[in-house]
Structures are given as C-alpha cells and as structure tokens.
Image (cartoon, helix red, strand yellow):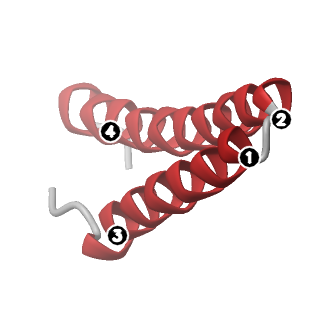
Amino acid sequence: MSIDVNTIFQIAGIGIIVAMIQTVLKQMGKDDWAQWVTLIGFVVILYMVASLIGNLFDKIKDVFLFQG
C-alpha cells in the first residue's frame, strides 16, 4: 500500500494555514475565534485521517477475507 504524497502535503498545508490564522487572530485579541479555527482545522484533518484508515481496513478485509 502506498500512501499518496498529496494527502500528506494537504494535511501539512492545512496545519500551516490554521497555525497562521490562529496567530493572526490571537494578535488581534480574538482568542475565542482562534480556538474555533483550531478546532475546525483539527476536525477536517481528523476526517481525512479517518477516511484513510477506513480505506486501509477495507484493503485488509479484502486481503484476508479474499473478497474482491
């Protein structure tokens, strides 16, 4: 199984963008909005990782149960 490099770059890009937005919002004094941006970024990345893990489990099921 090869993991697509684009997915890794997407996750890293989302992390960098969320960190920049959070820093700007904290400097503006909008700490509550900064926390929401961080939470939303975390949920988006968690969804991406969960879908990758779901695909992994499907591939494992196909290999061990000989279903194609």
The quadrant in which residue 56 appears is: top left
Instruction: Tell me where residue 19 appears, x and y as whole percent.
Output: 51, 49
Residue under label 3, please give it: 9
Q: Is residue 21 left or right of residue 31?
A: left
Q: Amino acid at mark 3?
A: Phe
Q: For the residue labelled by badge 3, is the local secondary structure a helix, a strand or a loop? A: helix
State the mark number for residue 30: 2
Residue under label 1, please give it: 25
Residues at marks 2 and 3, CA–CA distance in whole angstroms: 28 Å
Nearest-to-viewer mark from 1 and 4: 1
Q: For the residue labelled by badge 1, is the local secondary structure a helix, a strand or a loop? A: helix
Q: Residues within 10 Å of mark 4 (few under 14, many from 20)?
A: some
State the mark number for residue 42: none
Q: For the residue labelled by badge 4, is the local secondary structure a helix, a strand or a loop? A: helix
Mark 3 vs 1, N-terminal side:
3
Q: Residues within 10 Å of mark 1 (few under 14, many from 20)?
A: some
Q: Amino acid at mark 1?
A: Leu
Residues at marks 4 and 2, CA–CA distance in whole angstroms: 39 Å
Q: Is residue 54 left or right of residue 4?
A: right
Q: Residue at x 63, y 45 (%)?
A: 22
Q: Is residue 11 above or below residue 6?
A: above
Mark 4 vs 2, N-terminal side:
2
State the mark number for residue 56: 4
Mark 1 vs 4, N-terminal side:
1
